């Protein structure tokens, strides 16, 4: 749609630096228009027979499946992620979220017995660039199931799949105004979250921006949920099946170039097996294929933007300066585009920036421990608390660890497993509120 702001901005393919498209920049008048459309659609959508609402959401899920190839290609072109990931993870999971929440739409009274669930109103949703369509699904599916209308802003570098999604809503005959997509950068996001007619704000992104948003909505009575950063510990005990753990560590940190809020970016390995595990890990990293995101054999794609590449480079530089030891496989990188080699740092201590700050790139920091208590202490020694991994043969130890780890999600002998039925979210500076599962409906409902 022609923007009232009269402004457009380009989105590029980070693997080639070529421009893919120009999209409109929504400023005040455009944000107003979208919120007004959502507010006018709210009443009839909220009062629609729940089974009819479910039908629309099921239809969206089916259309996502039908158009999955196109969506996967767009996601990989716009964001740089390997096609095998967008094809096998992002798009199927996005469709699964709509399918799952469609099922709840007419069962809210059973989901919350003896309460009277009602919609909260227009939801303003702001998402990041690492899983554009999937983050959209995490936000829009529960909001619609609960009877709300939405205005969503995708990230500046990855707006295209959200725009295709808008087309899918039209194809599904969703009533006008129920879903509104506005594109733009941080300014657009801040106009949206502070709009007085927005009743609920849902944000996924950095802790820094999350704090700004929390300040902006304080005292307004708006509902708020924040999904922020992480610095997860992936903890390997000496009795773990090491080859399986190596696969989990690789997936934990190199999946989606490490642009993953719950990435296993700190490997904590028990001292007695550290040498053996690291040798296996280096061998495995040597086999990773870095390159063209559209090649289905690619394991590690392009870094999402130049700015993100510079952030990764800066933190890796600090790791070297602070005395950590680096390992990078000798792979060739394409001449154009934004790339970073899979990187493993050893000799890392707790005080190093690379052990404390979120790098959001393919960079693993390895620390060691001797006892389970030390593992817990090191794992929890972070301002974040989003996720963790535990690798051990002992079931009792898994339970002992999960009781003590301050993390929203703990994976045992696996990593980065997602399912729409399972809640996801953080402690401490990783945010509050849960997405997924029955919990994921709560932020979108008033209950009395
Ligand atoms: P970001 O800078 O916080 O941006 C996230 C979104 O907020 C983008 O759409 C951004 O727009 C927008 N935005 C920027 N400034 C804003 C403001 N003042 N008011 C409202 N919206 C604003 O984060 P990012 O660098 O894109 O994403 C990476 C971060 O997200 C990482 O820290 C990661 O851990 C976190 N993340 C968390 C989860 C989770 O579930 N917990 C999931 C994925 C990512 P522009 O991009 O257009 O500037
Ligand atoms: Mg792009």
Image (tube, rainbow, N blue to C red):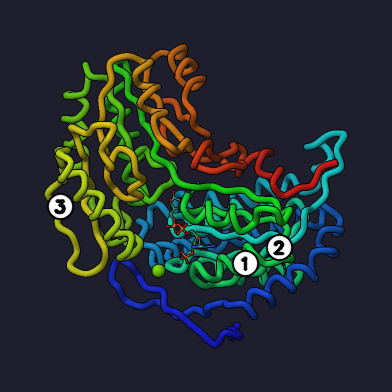
- Above or below, 161 relative to 145: below
Disc with the residue nearer the chain's start (1 vs 2):
1
The residue at 42%/28% (across/down) is 380
| Left or right side of 232 for 323 | left
Look at the numbered discs 1 and 2 and tell me whether their residues touch, using CB distance below 8 Å: yes
The Cα atoms of the two marked residues, 3 and 1, are separated by: 43 Å
Q: Which residue is mark 3?
A: 331
The residue at 34%/64% (across/down) is 305
| Left or right side of 372 for 423 | right
Q: Which residue is mark 1?
A: 192
| Left or right side of 352 for 420 | right
Front residue of this view, candidates 205 and 438 = 205
The residue at 62%/48% (across/down) is 225
Q: Which residue is mark 2?
A: 198
Asked which secondary structure carries label 3, the reply is loop
Front residue of this view, candidates 270 and 332 = 270
Disc with the residue nearer the chain's start (3 vs 2):
2
Q: Quadrant of residue 333?
A: bottom left
Classify the position of the N terminus by image quarter: bottom right
Asked which secondary structure carries label 1, the reply is helix
Q: Quadrant of residue 367?
A: top left
Q: Which circle marks residue 442 in the picture?
A: none
Disc with the residue nearer the chain's start (3 vs 1):
1
User: How many residues crowd around disc 1 within 10 Å: few (fewer than 14), some, or many (20 or more)?
Assistant: many
Task: Give residue 230's position: percent from left, percent from top.
Answer: 43, 42
Asked which secondary structure carries label 2, the reply is loop
Task: Give residue 246's position: percent from left, percent from top.
Answer: 28, 31
Task: Give residue 140's position: percent from left, percent from top.
Answer: 64, 56
Q: Is mark 3 within 8 Å of ligand 2?
A: no
The answer to whether residue 91 is visible is no
Q: Is mark 1 within 8 Å of ligand 1?
A: yes
């Amino acid at each position: 749609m022609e923007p009232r702001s009269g402004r457009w901005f380009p989105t590029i393919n980070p693997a080639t630096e070529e421009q893919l498209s120009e999209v409109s920049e929504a400023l005040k008048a455009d944000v107003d228009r979208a919120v007004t459309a959502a507010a006018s659609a709210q009443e009839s959508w909220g009062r629609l027979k729940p089974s009819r609402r479910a039908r629309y959401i099921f239809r969206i899920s089916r259309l996502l499946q039908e158009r999955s190839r196109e969506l996967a290609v767009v996601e990989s072109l716009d964001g740089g992620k390997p096609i095998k990931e967008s094809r096998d993870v992002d798009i199927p999971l996005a469709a699964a979220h709509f399918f799952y929440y469609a099922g709840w739409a007419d069962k809210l009274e059973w989901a919350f017995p003896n309460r009277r669930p009602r919609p909260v109103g227009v939801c303003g949703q702001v998402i990041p660039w690492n899983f554009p369509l999937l983050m959209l699904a995490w936000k829009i599916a529960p909001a619609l199931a609960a009877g709300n209308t939405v205005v969503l802003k995708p990230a500046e570098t990855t707006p295209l799949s959200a725009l295709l999604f808008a087309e899918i809503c039209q194809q599904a005959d969703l009533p006008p105004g129920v879903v509104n997509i506005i594109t733009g950068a941080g300014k657009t996001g801040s106009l949206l979250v502070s709009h007085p007619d927005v009743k609920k704000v849902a944000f996924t992104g950095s802790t820094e921006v999350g704090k700004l948003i929390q300040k902006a909505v304080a005292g307004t009575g708006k509902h708020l949920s924040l999904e922020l950063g992480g610095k997860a510990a992936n903890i390997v005990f000496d009795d773990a099946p090491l080859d399986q753990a190596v696969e989990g560590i690789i997936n934990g940190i190199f999946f989606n170039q490490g642009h993953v809020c719950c990435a296993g970016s700190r490997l904590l390995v028990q001292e007695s097996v550290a040498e053996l595990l690291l040798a296996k890990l280096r061998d495995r990293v040597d086999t990773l294929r870095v390159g063209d995101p559209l090649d289905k054999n690619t394991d590690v794609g392009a870094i999402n933007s130049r700015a993100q590449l510079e952030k990764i480079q800066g933190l890796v530089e600090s790791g070297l300066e602070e005395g950590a030891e680096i390992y990078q496989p000798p792979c060739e990188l394409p001449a154009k585009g934004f790339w970073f080699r899979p990187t493993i740092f050893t000799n890392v201590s707790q005080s190093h920036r690379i052990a404390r700050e979120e790098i959001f790139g393919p960079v693993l920091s390895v620390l060691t421990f001797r006892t389970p208590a030390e593992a817990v202490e090191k794992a929890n020694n972070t301002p974040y608390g989003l996720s963790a991994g535990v690798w051990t043969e002992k079931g009792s130890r898994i339970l002992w660890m999960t009781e003590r780890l301050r993390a929203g999600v703990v994976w045992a002998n696996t990593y980065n497993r997602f399912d729409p039925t399972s809640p996801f979210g953080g402690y401490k500076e990783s945010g509050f509120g849960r997405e997924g599962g029955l919990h994921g409906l709560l932020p979108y409902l008033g209950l009395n």
